[in-house]
Amino acid sequence: MVCVDIESLLRERGIFEKTIFYGIENIISDRMIWNLFGLMKKAAPPFVQFYSLPPEKIHGS
């Protein structure tokens, strides 16, 4: 069985990965401080930054 290191193969060809996760997340905890943080995060306005990616690299556009 051969394990292929795809990340190194892509880097050799000049392809560098960048992963951006976005969406809705809930913070649920038994600790009061994390629940307070989750409440503050829900109340704060969201902001999105695409790390100055060119339009052709943004998936879905």
Image (cartoon, helix red, strand yellow):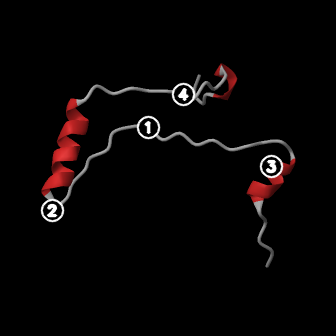
Residue at disc 3, secondary structure:
helix
* Local crowd size for mark 4, using a 10 Å CA cut-off: few (<14), some (14–19), many (≥20): few
Q: Is residue 31 left or right of residue 53?
A: left
The mark nearer the N terminus, 4 or 1, is 1
Residue type at mark 1 is Tyr
Task: Look at 25% across and 50% down and name the residue there.
Answer: 27
Residue designated by label 2 = 30
Q: Which residue is mark 3?
A: 11
Which residue bears the numbered disc 4?
50
Structural distance between the alpha carbons of marks 2 and 1: 25 Å
Q: Earlier in the sequence, mark 2 or mark 1?
A: 1
> Which numbered dot is residue 22?
1
The residue lying toward the viewer, choosing from 24 and 38, is 38
Q: Amino acid at mark 3?
A: Arg
Quarter-of-image position of residue 24: top left
Q: Report the Cα–Cα distance between label 3 and label 1.
A: 25 Å
